């Protein structure tokens, strides 16, 4: 059994009844014995903010052309 939290280094644990009595860190809530994962291993898909900006600009240009032609 670990006596230190692998995430924050705390030695204070409590039994969490919602997890069947599993020990969790009192400070950060990490379950005892769970290893900290590096940020590189997370599968986060990068957002394409540039594409969204270009689509919005194209729509604004289209609306502007339609307004100018209707005059």
Image (spheres, helix red, strand yellow):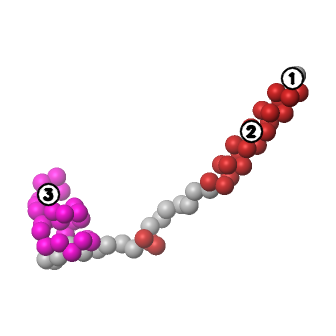
Q: Calculate the distance from the C-alpha at mark 3 to the C-alpha at mark 2.
A: 52 Å
The quarter of the rendered structure image containing the C terminus is top right
Residue 33 in sight from this viewpoint: no
Query: Which residue is drawn at the image coordinates 68% and 52% (left, top)?
Result: 51
Would you say residue 18 sits in the magenta stretch?
A: yes
- Is residue 26 found left or right of 43 in the rendered image? left
- Within-10-Å neighbours for mark 1: few <14, some 14–19, many 20+: few
Name the image quarter holding residue 65: top right
Mark 3 and mark 1 in contact? Answer it, CB < 8 Å.
no
Q: Give the residues drawn in magenta, as a range.
A: 7-34
Residue on which the image places disc 2: 59
Reply above or below: 41 against 60: below
- Is residue 56 found left or right of 9 in the rendered image? right
Q: Looking at this view, is 44 or 51 the one in front? A: 51
- Within-10-Å neighbours for mark 2: few <14, some 14–19, many 20+: few
Q: Looking at this view, is 12 or 32 the one in front? A: 12
Q: Which numbered disc, 2 or 1, marks the residue closer to the eye?
A: 1
Q: Calculate the distance from the C-alpha at mark 2 to the C-alpha at mark 1.
A: 17 Å
Q: Residue 69, how many percent across, how many down? A: 89, 27
Residue on which the image places disc 3: 16
Comes first in the chain, label 3 or label 1 = 3
């Amino acid at each position: 059994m670990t006596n230190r939290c692998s995430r924050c280094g705390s030695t204070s644990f409590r039994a969490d009844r919602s997890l069947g009595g599993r020990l969790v860190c009192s400070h950060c809530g990490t379950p005892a014995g769970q290893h900290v994962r590096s940020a590189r291993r997370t599968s986060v898909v990068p957002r394409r903010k540039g594409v969204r900006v270009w689509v919005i600009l194209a729509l604004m240009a289209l609306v502007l052309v339609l307004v100018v032609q209707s005059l």
